[in-house]
Amino acid sequence: MRLLWKLVILLPLINSCAGEGRFSRPIFIQEPQDVIFPLDLSRSEIILTCTANGYPSPHYRWKQNGTDIDFSMTYHYRLDGGSLAISSPRTDQDIGTYQCLATNPVGTILSRKAKLQFAYIEDFETKTRSTVSVREGQGVVLLCGPPPHFGDLSYAWTFNDNPLYVQEDTRRFVSQDTGNLYIAKVEPSDVGNYTCFVTNNEAHRSVQGPPTPLVQRTDGVMGEYEPKIEVRFPETIQAAKDSSVKLECFALGKVFLLEDGSLKICNVTRSDAGSYTCVATNQFGNGKSSGSLIVKERTVITIPPSKMDVTVGESIVLPCQVSHDPTMEVVFVWYFNGDVIDLKKGVAHFERIGGESVGDLMIRNIQLGHSGKYLCTVQTTLERLSAVADIIVRGPPGPPEDVKVEHISSTTSQLSWRPGPDNNSPIQIFTIQTRTPFSVGWQAVATVPEILNGQTYNATVVGLSPWVEYEFRVVAGNNIGIGEPSKPSELLRTKASVPIVAPVNINGGGGSRSELVITWESIPEELQNGEGFGYIVMFRPVGSTTWMKERVALVESSRFIYRNESIMPLSPFEVKVGVYNNEGEGSLSTVSIVYSGEDEPQLAPRGTSVQSFSASEMEVSWNAIAWNRNTGRVLGYEVLYWTDNSKESMIGKTRVSGNVTTKNITGLRANTIYFASVRAYNTAGTGPSSPPVNVTTKKSPPSQPPANIAWKLSNSKLCLNWEHVKTMENESEVLGYKILYRQNRQSKTHVLETNNTSAELLVPFEEDYLIEIRTVSDGGDGSSSEQIRIPKMSSLSSTGVQILKPSSQFLSMVGIFYCFAIQPLSR
């Protein structure tokens, strides 16, 4: 006998409204259930039910063993509403698991897995069974041996041609476990043919085996003997509290026997535990069969898993905790949508946590594919319990599908699309993005309507540029976030139109005499609006009423030159530039004033002079030119300089702009004659040069630094002393000295000048000071001494210590210091 467990699964109710203008995702009303179908030719169709609500009404698909059923390829399967009808079912192709999918524009739901199995029982083999020969009074067992089958069986026997089944009594017993017929003590009336009838209740079919002849032996009568237990109690049987237990017991000899050889205990309690003995007794003795009944506490799921609503990426724990008999081992097995969860393969997401009586399931980093039914089963040697929970994983929407361009004009495009899966959170908004060969990646575009809510599946994109290739994609968003974009639409070009963007930055000027040079910023390709693009240049002398018009056909052009001998230098022109293409002429720019080309300056600067400031620099000066249109405009001046009286060996050229009339030139050689000349320039070129002037640069500054520097510090007064620097013949004479000093931790340097070889500094020495001394000459500053570090007062003795920079020459000097007042140097 087998216990059948029925599991009722309650589907979650999702808040939705199917009223006009409101979409809701599908919700199952009926889901397919497990079916055991009898293989009976009288029944030719199986119906697996599936019904869902939703707005719009959902359409249905089915999967068999995980593969979509293609209804267009076979009439064996058909949809009856949402249910699946299987015609003329066959075990070789129809057995397996089935799932129903309900879909509308808001989303798709997947049903539980339903198993389809076929109950059957085959015919007995037709070969004749062997005769069973027994003596009168002997016990006998007739074997049934059922044929191959699937489903629960029940057994009965017939005797000879009697249509009635053999009735069980104290002498005859039919075991419902084995199907065997037991006769405790054969009597002459028992001789005949016995046939076993087997019924498969689920297959609705009964079969009968070949008859088994029972004959009586003629070699005597079986003597009386004590009972022999043939159907025995198990040695140990376990039962849960409140369950029912049947212990079969039947003895051969005479399966004074009690009225019933079997013992049935209903609603087992702890007090029913113990040893049970089946005793068969007659006047010759008795037979015994003993077994122990162990009663266990029932297993109860105390904390079952419950429905959860989570966001993709979260981690959750599904509880499954039980109370059970402490002597019983419990085994937890989790199922997801009907399939066993392999915790070894699913280690990235699934993990069993808890102790012996805790079967909690942790799902880490939960994904959209983890939505569904989770079944926790608890198994012991006596019981099998289960509890189910629905998990809804919500995430950003999936990519929209089937993005199509329905119509495209020069500046607009009409799009349509279908929503992708909402991933358990209703779509709230759509965004259209576009990409062109000129854009940097995908960019959002303006649409009509401006806001595309979750129930909008078409829109008009506006603000496009004519004659540009566009591709579009759609992105959906919900409360969780923005989803993946759709696949791009096909690449299409907008229609051409007259260009509307006029050139900007209209400028020009320069060029040669009798030329009008006009320039502008070229229009980028994405704004040219069609083929045959070019520029229209219009110009006229200021004061004229007639425009001259020229076309520039090259699309990359940004410059036009008009030549006419009658154009006077620096004549002002009104200029505007427009655009055109094969569709017609477009916009014109605003008017700009552009001057024609000019002559080079006709006059040379006067009053040119030059003077040397040091060994490496000189200054050139001149008088500005008073110019007019006849003498040529002056934009600035160009200074030329060289080292001999021939310009062919010119070594330098530099420019100044505007009315600047001096230029300092550096980087020259010492004690060298330099010639210089100045000329004016404008856009046409340079004018005549002034007569050259010359100057000799100063000799080089002294190359030797001050040496043998000594110092003495008393309070805040620092006395310095050093040797006079003697110069070489090619060096400028020493005119004085510069003392550069700064605090050790500061960058600001102070400078004092003196024409003596000693100096006194009055500074607060709160920090170390760094001091260096360099020569001063007409040729410039000479070399600096090495830096001298003067320690702060706190590091010296209280009386002041004289510290000298060591030098073999200086050690021979008298160690007396004189401090002189510092006087400014004169040149």
Image (cartoon, grey):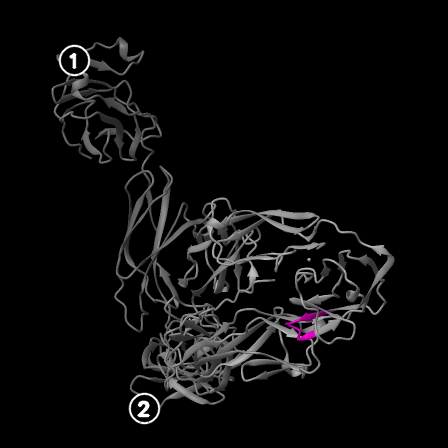
Q: Is residue 620 above or below residue 581?
A: above
Pinpoint residue 595: horizontal percent, then vertical percent. 34, 76
**Going from the N terminus, do you reach mark 2 or mark 1 first?**
2
Q: Quadrant of the N terminus?
A: bottom right
* Residue 723, percent from left and from top: 25, 19
Residue range in magenta is: 197-205
The picture quadrant where one finds residue 569 is bottom left
Marks 1 and 2: in contact by CB < 8 Å?
Answer: no
Horizontal arrangement in the rendering, residue 610 relative to residue 329 (left or right): left
Q: Is residue 261 visible?
A: yes
Is 253 situated left or right of 382 in this image? right
Nearest to viewer (mark 2 / mark 1)? 1
Residue at 28% x, 58% y: name it.
606
Q: Which mark is residue 545?
A: 2
Residue position marked by numbered label 1 in the rendering: 797
| 123 sits left or right of 424 in the view | right
For this rendering, which residue is in front, 419 or 139? 139
Give the residue type at disc 2.
Answer: Thr
Disc 1 secondary structure class: loop
Which of these two is toward me, 184 or 110? Answer: 184
Does the magenta segment cover residue 278? Answer: no
Report if residue 512 is visible in the image: no
Q: Quadrant of residue 559?
A: bottom left
Amino acid bearing label 1: Ser
